[in-house]
Amino acid sequence: MRTPRPPVAAAPPPDAVRLDVWLDVACLFKTRSQATTACRAGKVEVNGQPGKPHRLVRAGDELRISRVGQKQLVVVTGLAEQHVAKSEARKLYEDRTPPPSPEEIELKRLLRQAGIRPPTKAPDKRERRQLRRLKQEG
């Protein structure tokens, strides 16, 4: 006859997590490799210092994430090493990004009306042709 095993205790929450892992788990980047790439490119700062992918993040750390056309300011409120539900992931940080100014909102509206979109990706074939024509005319 076997002796019963004691119940498995839940692992204590970590006191620090790798930056690239945390950015992925918190759903601030789609994948860990995208988070790593952003860190290596200097797009992520931790408490004013460049955020290397292997840097450990703790609760209370302030992250500044540079994205196309905007900067996101986030304060770490919780830690997790494994993926959690998106609703739980949003509780891992507090977003302190200031709202856009009225001038920025108006500029975006004007650009949208003019058919100019922000450079979020490389231009497609049609857009490359338009750019080439504009350069030849000028």
Image (tube, rainbow, N blue to C red):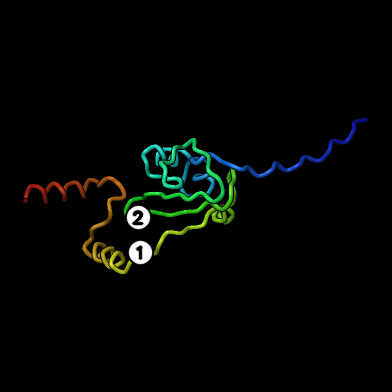
The type of residue carrying mark 2 is Gln
Q: Tell me if label 1 and label 2 are in contact, CB under 8 Å.
A: yes
The disc placed on residue 53 is: none
Q: Which of the pair 17/37 is nearer the observer?
A: 17
Picture coordinates of residue 25 (x, y %)? 54, 46
Residue located farthest toward the right when viewing the structure as drawn? 1
Residue depicted at x 48% and y 51%: 62
Count residues near mark 1 (Cα–Cα under 10 Å), then give few for <14, some for 14-19, many for 20+. few
From the viewer's perspective, is residue 105 above or below residue 10?
Answer: below
Query: Which mark sits nearer the N-terminus, 1 or 2?
Result: 2
Instruction: Judge by depth and name the residue closer to the eye, 122 or 60.
Output: 60
Cα gap from disc 1 to disc 2, whole angstroms: 9 Å
Q: Please give left or right for residue 138 compared with residue 4 in the image.
A: left
Judging by the rendered image, the residue that carries numbered circle 2 is: 70
The residue singled out by tag 1 in the image is 100
Secondary structure state at the residue bearing disc 1 = loop
Q: Depth check: 72 or 89 in front?
A: 72
Q: Residue 78 location in percent, x, y?
A: 58, 51
Q: Look at the numbered disc 2 and give the secondary structure of its residue.
A: strand
34 left or right of 118 in image: right
Residue at 38% x, 44% y: name it: 43
Q: Does 5 sit left or right of 133 as displayed?
A: right
Q: Position of residue 103 (x, y in %)?
A: 28, 67
